[in-house]
């Protein structure tokens, strides 16, 4: 039986099955290279959400941190969301898996509340 697997999902499946220790070491590096703010966020010193490169592919650092920490090979339909609304935050405790619809709803909430999310 042939199962279609998205390349990034296959990448995470391989990482989790075969390279978990190296991936965790990279997560530790990412977490160490942050500043903790007043909300408990671990914020990367980058303008855009940081990216990480690992075994020939790359992803956003917060997504990588969540997938490796939770042992989850996320599909393209799943997005890693920030409870804290800070997209440069990589604190595993602030990250939660959701759907694209959840993410859109977050943005609508932010707009409705008058928050300029371009600054987030
Ligand atoms: Zn945070």
Image: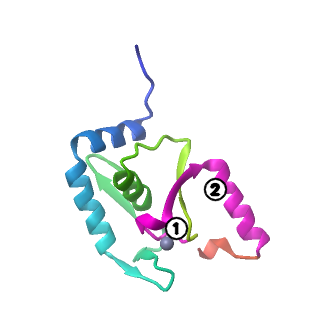
The reply to whether residue 85 is in sight is: yes
Q: Residue furthest right?
A: 112
Q: Quadrant of the N terminus?
A: top left
Q: Which residue is mark 1?
A: 87
Q: Which mark is residue 103?
A: 2
Q: Residue at x 38, y 52 (%)?
A: 70
Q: Residue at x 38, y 81 (%)?
A: 35
Does 5 appear above or below 55?
Answer: above
Q: Is mark 2 within 8 Å of ligand 1?
A: no
Q: Is mark 1 within 8 Å of ligand 1?
A: no
Give the quarter of the image for residue 32.
bottom left
Crowding near pointer 1: few (<14 within 10 Å), some, many (20+)?
Answer: many
Location of residue 77 in the rendering, given as x and y in whole percent from the top left corner: 56, 41
Distance between mark 1 and mark 2 Cα atoms: 12 Å
Relative depth, front residue between 14 and 50: 14
Answer with left or right where residue 105 lies relative to residue 15.
Answer: right
Q: Residue at x 24, y 49 (%)?
A: 20
> Is residue 110 found inside the magenta-colored segment of the image?
yes
Point out the tag, 1 or 2, that comes first from the N-terminus. Answer: 1
> Is residue 95 found inside the magenta-colored segment of the image?
yes
Does 1 appear above or below 52?
Answer: above
The reply to whether residue 49 is in sight is: no
State the SS at label 2: helix
Location of residue 76 in the rendering, given as x and y in whole percent from the top left corner: 52, 41
The stretch in magenta equals: 86-113
Answer with left or right where residue 67 lies relative to residue 33.
Answer: right
Q: Residue at x 37, y 59 (%)?
A: 65
């Amino acid at each position: 039986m042939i199962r279609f697997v998205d390349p990034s999902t296959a990448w995470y499946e391989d990482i989790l099955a075969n390279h978990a220790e190296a991936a965790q070491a990279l997560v530790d590096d990412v977490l160490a290279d942050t500043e903790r703010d007043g909300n408990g966020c671990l914020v990367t010193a980058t303008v855009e959400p940081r990216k990480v490169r690992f075994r020939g592919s790359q992803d956003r650092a917060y997504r990588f941190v969540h997938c490796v920490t939770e042992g989850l090979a996320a599909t393209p339909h799943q997005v890693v969301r920030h409870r804290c609304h800070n997209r440069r935050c990589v604190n595993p405790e602030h990250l939660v898996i959701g759907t694209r619809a959840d993410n859109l709803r977050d943005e609508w909430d932010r707009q409705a509340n008058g928050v300029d999310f371009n600054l987030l």
